[in-house]
Image (cartoon, grey):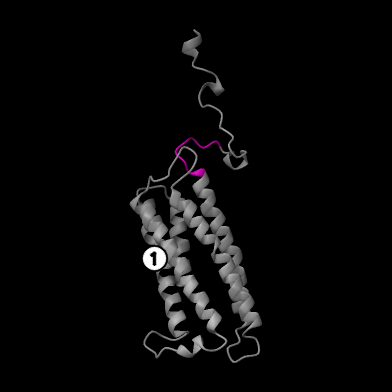
C-alpha cells in the first residue's frame, strides 16, 4: 500500500508541475515503488508471507501454494522490466521522440503494464478456486482487491500508451486521439494557407 501511495503522489506531482523536477519525479521517484515491489515479490516467492528476519517457508513450493510462488516470480520480473524502462527513459530522454510520439520507453512501459492485468486476474481466480476450503484460504476482500487491480492496471497501461501517443514535439491539436491512423495534421499558420509573401 505504501508503494502505491508513493507512486500515486509522484504521478500527481508530475501532472501538476511541468518543471525541471518532472523528469526526476518520473524517472527517479516513481521507480522506487516498483523496485520495492520487485524485492517484496521475490521475498514472497522464496519465503512466502514471512518477515525477512523469520525462517523461510519453503513448503509453499510443494503444496497448493506453488502456483502463487510462480506468480510472485513473474510479478518480480514484471516490476523489474518497469524499473528498467524508467531508467532507460532517464538515460535517453529524447530517444524515439518524433513530432507525433513521445519517448519510446513510454510505449514499452505501456506494453509491460498490460501484462499486470492477466497476472492479477490469475491470482484472483486461483485464490478463489485453489485455496478455498484449505487452511490457506484467503478472504473475500483480498480476492476482490486482486480483481480491482486488474482494472486499475489496465487503465494505467492505457494512460502510459496515450502519453506516448500524444507527447511528441509537434503542436498539440487537441484532436489527436480522434485522428485516423496515418492521417496528417493540417499545416499550421495562416489557417492552412500558403505564405502570403509568395502570392503578393
Q: Is residue 22 above or below residue 178?
A: below
In this view, the residue in front, 197 or 90, is 90
Query: At x 47% / y 37%, what residue is drawn?
Result: 99
Judge whether residue 25 can be spotted in this image. no
Give yes or no for residue 170 being in the magenta stretch: yes
Query: At x 46% / y 12%, what residue is drawn?
Result: 197
Q: Position of residue 31 (x, y in %)?
A: 40, 62
Judge whether residue 192 can be spotted in this image. yes
Q: Is residue 189 above or below residue 78?
A: above
Q: Position of residue 161 (x, y in %)?
A: 53, 51
Residue on which the image places disc 1: 32
How many marks the image carries: the answer is 1
Q: Quadrant of residue 183?
A: top right
- Residue 121 left/right relative to 53: right
In this view, the residue in front, 67 or 160, is 67
Q: Is residue 85 above or below residue 138?
A: above
Q: Is residue 169 above or below residue 195?
A: below
In this view, the residue in front, 132 or 196, is 132
Give yes or no for residue 101 being in the magenta stretch: no
Q: Dot 1: within a 10 Å radius of its alpha carbon, few (fewer than 14), some, or many (20 or more) residues?
A: some
Which residue appears farthest toward the top when viewing the image? 200
Which residue appears farthest toward the front when viewing the image? 62
Q: Quadrant of residue 97?
A: top left
Q: Position of residue 87 (x, y in %)?
A: 37, 57
Query: At x 58% / y 58%, what residue is drawn?
Result: 155
In this view, the residue in front, 136 or 9, is 136
Decide whether the magenta segment is chiefly helix, strand or loop: loop
Residue segment shown in magenta: 166-173
Dot 1 lies on which element?
Answer: helix
Amino acid at each position: 500500500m505504501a508503494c502505491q501511495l508513493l507512486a500515486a503522489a509522484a504521478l500527481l506531482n508530475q501532472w501538476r508541475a511541468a518543471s525541471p523536477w518532472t523528469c526526476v519525479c518520473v524517472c527517479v521517484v516513481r521507480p522506487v515503488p516498483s523496485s520495492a515491489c520487485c524485492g517484496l515479490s521475490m521475498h514472497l516467492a522464496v519465503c512466502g508471507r514471512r518477515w525477512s528476519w523469520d525462517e523461510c517457508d519453503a513448503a509453499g513450493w510443494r503444496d497448493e501454494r506453488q502456483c502463487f510462488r510462480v506468480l510472485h516470480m513473474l510479478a518480480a520480473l514484471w516490476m523489474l522490466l518497469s524499473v528498467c524502462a524508467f531508467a532507460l527513459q532517464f538515460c535517453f530522454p529524447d530517444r524515439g521522440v518524433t513530432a507525433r510520439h513521445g519517448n519510446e520507453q513510454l510505449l514499452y512501459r505501456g506494453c509491460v503494464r498490460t501484462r499486470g492485468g492477466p497476472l492479477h486476474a490469475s491470482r484472483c481466480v486461483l485464490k478463489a478456486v485453489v485455496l478455498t476450503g484449505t487452511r490457506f484460504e484467503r478472504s473475500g476482500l483480498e480476492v476482490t482487491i486482486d480483481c480491482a487491480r486488474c482494472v486499475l492496471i489496465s487503465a494505467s497501461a492505457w494512460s502510459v500508451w496515450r502519453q506516448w501517443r500524444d507527447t511528441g514535439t509537434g503542436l498539440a491539436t487537441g484532436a489527436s486521439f480522434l485522428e485516423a491512423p496515418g492521417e496528417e495534421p493540417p499545416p499550421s499558420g495562416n489557417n492552412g494557407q500558403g505564405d502570403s509573401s509568395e502570392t503578393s
